Amino acid sequence: MIAAAAALVALPIAAAAPWMQPADSPAAALFKRQNGPPNPASPDFATHYPPQGQPPNGTWIPQPWLDKLKSITLPPNNPVATLTGCCTVQYPNIAQGGMSPDICSFTAGCHTPTDFFDAPNNTFVLTFDDGPGDASQTLYTFLKGNNISNRATHFMIGGNIVGAPSVAQEAFNGGGHIAVHTWSHHYTTSLSNEQVLGELGWTMQAIADLTGGRIPAYWRPPYGDVDNRVRTIAKAVFGLETVLWNRDTNDWKIGSDPAYTIESVKGILDGWLNGPRSPGILALEHEITSATVEAFMAEYPKFAAQNWQVSAVADAYGLDWYQNAVGNTGDLFATLSVGGQVNTNLAVTARPTSTSASASPSADAAAGSSTPSGVSSAETSAKTGNAQNNKQNAASSVVVPGFGALLAAAGALLAFAF
Ligand SMILES: *[C@@H]1O[C@H](CO)[C@@H](O)[C@H](O)[C@H]1NC(C)=O
Ligand SMILES: *[C@@H]1O[C@H](CO)[C@@H](O)[C@H](O)[C@H]1NC(C)=O
Ligand SMILES: *[C@@H]1O[C@H](CO)[C@@H](O)[C@H](O)[C@H]1NC(C)=O
Ligand SMILES: [Zn+2]
């Protein structure tokens, strides 16, 4: 096997990394794709994905996602919320509404210990939601010019990604951390379980397809609208961590609420600049309009000058950027824990194991054994994100150095390229 593996390594490596999950990995079952990912340069690229702007439904929900959903336990007493008008979500028959500990809706003001809410001291966690969009490239140019492309997390909308795949790839190739902001930007607590699957899964699929197979590890609910039902689906089906915010720039109100202007948003940021550093700032910012981007660009240099530690989400908590990769470059993990379940069956596969026989757990794996998926009991108090508590995915993954490159070469031969 060693000789065979060495021979495979010697093959020319395809320029475009194929989809590189081992055939038996949970990710392969959840995100199977035959004949490689769709070509973003092709005019029919978007037709490989659900229609933009609406929750994927019907035949757009793959059976493996439905099977995985059936296999998990959803929290009791957390019904689907009703959405009234544009933006009121309610739980009509529940006395405490969204503040019920069984529900813990962030729209109602509740978050859980597993949510990413506060930031570490002195840290400004930089996030931009709703891209890729018209203002994205201005932002990416600015980030690059300030050498901080890799210090921002972009919570992208799946429909926007397939509408502008080259812009999404620009964020990724520039070094940005890519994460999930659902497919169609709906209030997720008002969606059925199956619609939540479609909203998260297809956005993950689109990101993975454009990033050489990287499975996102983080998602942020549109409008912050999440409850225990949706948290559980995100984590137990897809392995996604829920990222909220502890400070809102309100930049998203520029243009719709006259009280908010570029100047007022800059004022909010100035307040943070000189405000408390404990906890740090996990900010809500957007790359939707030139105004939101302009406010950030005007303020960033001040934060840098005052020694705020500007950081992408994962780095702020000492975590990997993706479920199956440390970052945008380097190898993918050979195994992946989607939804907290570790695949223990790898030894029997035909993958080129020789070079991985000596695979050692990653640095993160030392953190401990896998932890249960799902959601801890609700609490309304602020709690600082705890890297150890949030390490469950990384802790149960195994890194196999060189495996990604090996598969890139071997993919065609061994039919591992999904
Ligand atoms: C999916 O949703 C679209 C629009 O919301 C609707 O037109 C279509 O009939 C739905 N398809 C199924 C199979 O439910
Ligand atoms: C970015 O990095 C380059 C190369 O290290 C350096 O020349 C440049 O001054 C840096 N720019 C900023 C704004 O820090
Ligand atoms: C963060 O700052 C607070 C207040 O200064 C301090 O009590 C706490 O120990 C700090 N946390 C860490 C991890 O340093
Ligand atoms: Zn949004």
Image: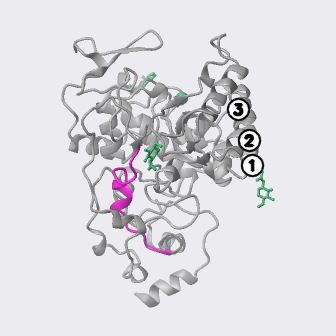
The answer to whether the beta carbon of the residue marked 1 is less than 8 Å from any atom of ligand 2 is: yes
On screen, 55 above or below 363?
above
Which residue type carries mark 3?
A: Val
Q: Is residue 376 magenta?
A: no
Cα distance between the residues tagged 2 and 1: 9 Å
Mark 1, residue position:
146
Q: Please check the rendered image and state whether residue 399 is part of the magenta-colored stretch, yes or no.
A: yes
Q: Which residues are magenta?
A: 385-402
> Does the rendering let one see residue 157?
no
Mark seen at residue 301: 2
Dot 2: what SS? helix
Q: Quadrant of residue 256?
A: top right
> SS for tag 1?
loop
Q: Is residue 15 above or below residue 91?
A: below
Q: With 311 as the anchor, is 174 left or right in this view? A: right
Decide which of tag 2 and tag 3 comes sooner along the chain: 3
Residue 287: percent from left, percent from top: 65, 33
- Which amino acid does the dot numbered 2 rest on? Pro
User: How crowded is the residue under tag 1: few (<14 C-alpha within 10 Å), some, or many (20+)?
Assistant: few
Is mark 2 in CB contact (under 8 Å) with mark 3?
A: no
Local packing at callout 3 (Cα closer than 10 Å; few below 14, some 14-19, many 20+) is: many
Mark 3 beta carbon near ligand 4 (under 8 Å): no
Using residue 81 as the reference point, say whether residue 277 is left or right of it: right
Q: Which residue is mark 3?
A: 293
